[in-house]
Structure formats: C-alpha cells, structure tokens
Image (cartoon, rainbow, N blue to C red):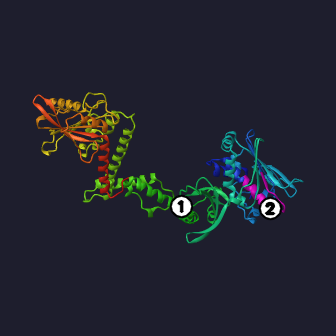
Amino acid sequence: MMNSFAEIKSLAARFYKNKQNGIELTLRECISNSIHACIIKSKNTTHYFPKIEIVISGSQNSITIKDNGIGFSEQDKQVFCALAMQNKLKIDHNLPTKGLGRLAIVHFSIEALYETSNQGKRLSFTYPQENIQNLFEQSAECSKSEDGTTLYLKFPKNTFKTFANKYKDLEKFKKWFMDNFIFLSNDIKIEISINIDNIDNKIFSLDTENIEKFDRAITIDNKSFNCNFYLIKSTKLEIKLVAHKLLTNRNIDYDRDFKENNKKIYLSSELLDERITADGLDIEICDIRNILTQEITKILDEYFKETIESQKKQSEKNLEQTKGELPFLGDFMPTYSSLNGFKIETREDFIDKAIKDKGEAEKQFWCSQNNDQLDERLQKSSLYLHVKHRERVLNRLEEMMSNPQYSENDFHQLLTDRKCKDLKVANHNLWLLDDKFSYFIEAYSAKHGEKKVDLELYFNPFIDEENSPKQVVLVELKRLTRAHNPGEMIEQLLKYASDIYKESKTKKGTKFDPEKCKFFGYIIADYKDIKKEEGQQDSYIFKPIPFTNSSFEGIKSFQTDNGRIDIAITLLSIQDLITVSKSRNKIFLDMLSQPNP
C-alpha cells in the first residue's frame, strides 16, 4: 500500500527528530543504496568496474552521489512509494532492506532529486512529493544512458556548514566511509571519487586486503551464533557493532589497554541482525550486554594472546624495579601472579595501588581496638620511609659539600626550617647530629643575619621535671666549604653560652637554674676548619672521637659572675657527620633485612 506524503513526513519526524549528524545519516542511506546497486550489477554483468562519485558543493550546500550500478526499475519505484514493502531484488542478493532509511532523506534534506537509468529506461523525480500518486503513476522514458543513479541532495545552510567543517580533512571522511561500509565494501571493490567544490578531487578504494578477518561462534541463551570479526590497524582499541552490514551506534567494551598492536574491530552477527532497531541505527542488546561482552572478550583475549603475554612480562619487570626502588611500599604492591597483561602496569600504577592498600591497612589499625599486633607491613613501611628521607637529606648534604655556591644559610635551612623559629613545629633534620636531638622541650633556630647561636635546644631527660631544662645544647653551623671565622669558632660558641647562662630562661620564658644545667656545644664545619680550630687549643683539651677521621671532643669553660662553667664541646667535621649518619641509616636497613637502597 502506497504511503501518503503526510505519512512519510510524520514517520520521518518520529524516527529522526532527535538525531544528530543528520547529513551523515542521510549519506549512510544513500551511499549504501549505491553500493547495493553496484553489487547487484556486478553479479549480473561481466567486465564491470563499479564506481561511486561524491561531489560536495559548499556554494550550493549540496551533495551529489552518482553510481554506475543498476538503476530504478518499475518495481523499485513501487517499493520507494510504499515503506512497508520489501525490495525483493535486495533480498535475493542477501542485502539488507529495512525500508525506513530513506526517511533520513525526507527529514534532513531540503530537496532530493533522483535521476536513474535501468535497462534503457530513464526516470527523474523528487522525493517525497506532496502528491505521491504522481510519482507512482510516472512512466519511465526510453534512454540510451548507461545504468546508474544520480542523487542530488540540498541541505539547510547551517547544517551543511557544520558537516563541511567536520570533514574538511578528506582522511577523516575516508575513515567515516570505512567505519560505515567496511562490510558492504568487502563484497565488491568500488572506486570512490570525492570532489569538494571542484578543487580537491580524491579517488580511493577501501583497502580490504589489509583487513584481518576471522569467524568465531558465541553462545547466548544456550543458542550458538556465528560472529564475523574484521580488524584494521588503529591508534586505539575499540569494538564497533555492525548489523545488516552497516555500522550501528552501539559499541561494547573490551577492557584492555594495549600499548602496541591496537585494532579497530568490527563485529557482525546474525544475533545483531535480529536485534536491529527500526531505523537501522541501533541494536537492542541491553538484556544480553554482559554475556555478549564476556563471550567477545574470551575470543579477543585469545586473538591478542601474544600481546597480553608480552605486556605481562613488561609489567613484571616494572614491578621488580619499583619494589627495588621503593622497598618501604613493596609489601603493599601486587604479587607477580596477579599481573594479567591486560595493560602495562607502570611504576606510578604500583605506587598508587600500594598507597591505597597501605591507607586501608592504616584505617583498619586506627578504627579497630581489637588488633593486638601491628601489621608488619606498616611497621616496615614507616621505617623505610624514615630511612629513605634520611638518604635524600644526606645526598643533598654531599651535594652542598662539593659545590661552593651553597652558603651557611643553605646548610642551616637543610637542618631546620629557618623560616620557623620554634623548631617544635618545624620540619627539621636534627637527627643528622644525633637521633636524640629529635626530642626536646624547646628548640629555636636563629634568623638569617641574627647575632645569635644558630640552634638552641633545651632537654630534660628526667620525666618527673619535664618542664624544667636540665641540658642546654648549642649548635653552630659553618659554611661547608670554608668557615668565615676559622680559629675563632670556639670563642664565638663560649660567648653564646655565657649569654644564655645570664638569661637563665628559654625564649618561651621558662626559667631554669643554670647551676643545675649541663651545657653542650657543637661546631660543624669542613674538616680543614675543624683541624685548624683544634690545633689552636692546648693539646690536652681535645681528643679524637673514635671512628672518625677529623672530629674532636673536649671540655672548655666560659666565664660567669659565679665563676667558670664547663661546656662539653664537639668539633664535628661535615665529612664525619655524613659518614656517621650513613652508618646509622645502614643499621636501620639491616634491621629490615633489606639491601641498602
């Protein structure tokens, strides 16, 4: 039964009013019809070279599609006027014939003019016509023209402009053509000519020889379906679903990430043909998506077996290197057997996973009151982190030693955050001197240029009098390559000690009895300055410190109103400080039964 003009317009709006990419949808319908015409003619004609020409005119907002396939027969015209009627000729040649694709032409184009010749008969008409009966009754004219069809399509200006900007790169249009017609083009090699505004003319044919193809069976709801896989090289891995030999809007996920050997995969199956929507653009697979994805994943995992195995080996290598570099996180990283090769897992991946796992372990520790034993991984991780931080500080210290551009202020900043006067709330590295210096009642750092001792620390080893200092430690830091006052460093330290004795209170105002306090002083400088300082003292005062090369300790005194007060002074070379600090670090590492990182 013939459809009226109103029915055709209404159906077109119903199917396409919310669709995007209207020109692409129209071309999809028209080009597929041209390919169908060429396929049918090739099966009934010898020495035939199928051609399709596409002319894009920006000035006319139009696209013309011309083919040399079979033209419209009288029966084809009847099918064209009755949407529910199927095209028997297409069915006989195993070509899809839903009959509704032409509605895209109706909805998106302003004008569609057909000129077609078939077996000496020529027909010209616009579609649709307000009086569809005229088309139905129109008779073909005799003609000597070769078989074929020319379709002239005119589009709204803004719609056409969007399309033209999108596909001004012809390679992009060629990829669109491949996506949509790869299965149809596999049936026949067609020469495609594209002309844009009579300036840029490109002729190509889809390179079907480089398409990898294989068939596999899948099982859905206890029923077996054959699947056709077409694969082409691509920059990313993706699966596109094809129904009735045309691309649909539906994809499925393949949760793999390949660094190399990526493919664009086109999948066609009778299963998908059965589930195609009325407009031919989509497939209804919501009820089988999960099982379909699983079946396809199994097939593709087998196909990409070598790639997956190669990526697994690379991930194992990356894991080994990362565990070696970051042993304090190693216990939180995945096992080698858990690596699957579905992606190349990197150092960053392993660190992210380890930190997440470690966070969960710490959360469990803090949230649970029932765990009597601390997770051994947390114990080792915390200590490793501490040791690794120390290693970095020591490396920076060695860098400062070898570069005269570093100043005394740089050294001071490394030990303490000089911007933070109260060291109790600062990020400091006083462990470089001794681990016991990390725990104090009060500690202060002199500002740059301030005529004060560089570091001033107060200790009380007796818990019962926690707030009253019993030990005062003064630290003077010198430039690592050459001190500004060699030979005068001890006298400078004694003056600072005398000032603190007279003040008899900390910077926070805590008073203490200096007579009951022990005073300690440290001078840290290059070994040459240390030896010069020691050489100017009486020979019996300073003695070499065991296991060092150029450091000394001894007792000096400073003058007060109550007489002289002793102060134990350590002359510590920066070279020995680094050696001793590294030894302490090594002890931690030995405790963890791990090699020195």
Q: Amino acid at mark 2?
A: Ser
Residue 177 located left or right of residue 456:
right
User: Percent x, y for residue 317?
Assistant: 47, 58
The residue to which callout 2 is attached is: 42
Q: Residue furthest left?
A: 562
Quarter of the N terminus within the rendering = bottom right
Instruction: Tell me which residue sits at (31%, 58%) in the image.
Output: 376
For residue 33, side relative to residue 511 (left or right): right
Q: In x, y percent, where is residue 116?
A: 82, 53
Q: Quadrant of residue 86?
A: bottom right
State which quadrant residue 513 falls in. top left
Mark sitting on residue 310: 1
197 or 170: which is nearer to us? 170
Secondary structure category for the residue under label 1: helix
Rendered location of residue 159, percent (x, y): 67, 42
**Viewer-side residue, 354 vs 202:** 354
Q: Residue at left 39%, top 54%?
A: 354
Q: Amino acid at mark 1?
A: Ser
Pointer 1 with pointer 2, Cβ within 8 A:
no
Mark 2, other Cα within 10 Å: few <14 / some 14–19 / many ≥20:
some
**Alpha carbon distance from label 1 to label 2:** 45 Å
Magenta stretch holds residue 418: no
User: From the viewer's perspective, is residue 197 above or below residue 294?
Assistant: above
| In front of the other: 584 or 291 | 584
Confirm whether residue 206 shows in the render. yes
- SS for dot 2: helix
